Amino acid sequence: MKKLAVIALGGNALLRGNQEGTIDEQEQNTTETLENMVFLLKEGYDLVITHGNGVHEIDFNTISYQKGDILFVNKGSVHAWLKTEDIEGYVIFFNEEFLFQNQVKFNDLSYTYPYNSVLYEAKLTIELEFGFFKNMASMLYKEFNNASNDVGAEIIKNLLRVFILKAQQCSKQEHTSLKGKSEDVVLFTRFQKLLNKRICSSRNAVFYCERLNVSYQKLNEVSKRLTNLTVKGVIDDYTVLEAKRQLSQKIKNVSEVSTSLGFEEATNFSKFFKKRVGILPKAFTNL
């Protein structure tokens, strides 16, 4: 069963025997390593840091981390390791096929804690439970390497489930900032799902309100309570982020990205993008 993997990377793994170990050398080695993992950019990740500190870029935001941090990266996110000297930890990744086969246990994972990046922070610090999560990651790694039958596969599924549930339990944000707002969260995530599916059709707030069978005022109030953004603001932010993701992968040209995001003319998309990002889409692809 090769639908789940745990990868442990230490600083020494990124240092070649004939090198001095400079930051530039290690950055280059890291880049070369990750180029072989490009296909994973559209998959979901959990990163457990067991030693060292550094920074990680997720959807164009730089996040610092240290021992005892977990970084959650949602499906579709673009991310990259930045300059790192001595980091040890685990990377746990699982693809859509794995989630599809476990819908009862992982239903709507992309829209719940900890993967919904609009509602939750990507980083969870687990100082008091560090030993638990480190052991869980180690067990996942061991079971994956030993899983040769259905029993082993079932163990992996359940270990991952416990890992995610424990993260939910440990998160203060999960139990405080959204406390008493469960109905709001349900409505907002319905909006997110529809936006993800229909962004190519419309970026008009009323379009989504009508299909959610909710008034604009209601959806706008919920959006402001949860994100401090209007419905239009959420739509625009999503459009910009998705545009950045697609442009950074350099698979589609500007015109194709424009069409995928519901713009009738590429020139309108370019104006929209420049107004919010500060540069034209073509220039962004060359960064």
Image: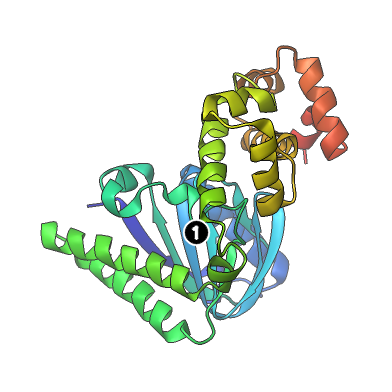
Image colouring: rainbow
* Residue 244 in view, yes or no: no
Position of 248 relative to 22 (above/below):
above
x and y, in percent, of residue 65 in the image: 64, 72
Q: How many marks?
A: 1
User: Where is residue 56 shown, x and y percent of the image?
Assistant: 64, 62
Q: Secondary structure at mark 1?
A: loop
Residue 103, how many percent across, how many down? 29, 46
Q: Please identify the quarter of the rendering in which residue 6 is found.
A: bottom left
**Mark 1 residue type:** Tyr
Viewer-nearest residue: 215 or 96: 215
Q: How far across and down, in percent of the image, does residue 199 sit?
A: 60, 26
Q: In this figure, which residue is indicated by the disc labeled 1? A: 113
What residue lies at 30% left-to-right and 50% top-to-bottom?
3
Specify few, some or many for label 1: CA neighbours under 10 Å numbering under 14, 14-19, or 20 or more: many
- Taking the image as shown, residue 158 lies to the left or right of residue 127, namely left
Q: Up-down: is 145 above or below 11? A: above
Q: Residue at x 87, y 32 (%)?
A: 275
Residue 178 visible, this orientation: yes
Say if 278 sits above or below 27 in the image. Answer: above
Tell me the quarter of the picture where residue 101 sits.
top left
Q: Quadrant of the C terminus?
A: top right
> As drawn, is 163 to the left or to the right of 39?
left
Work out whether residue 42 or residue 168 is closer to the camera in this orientation and state it.
168
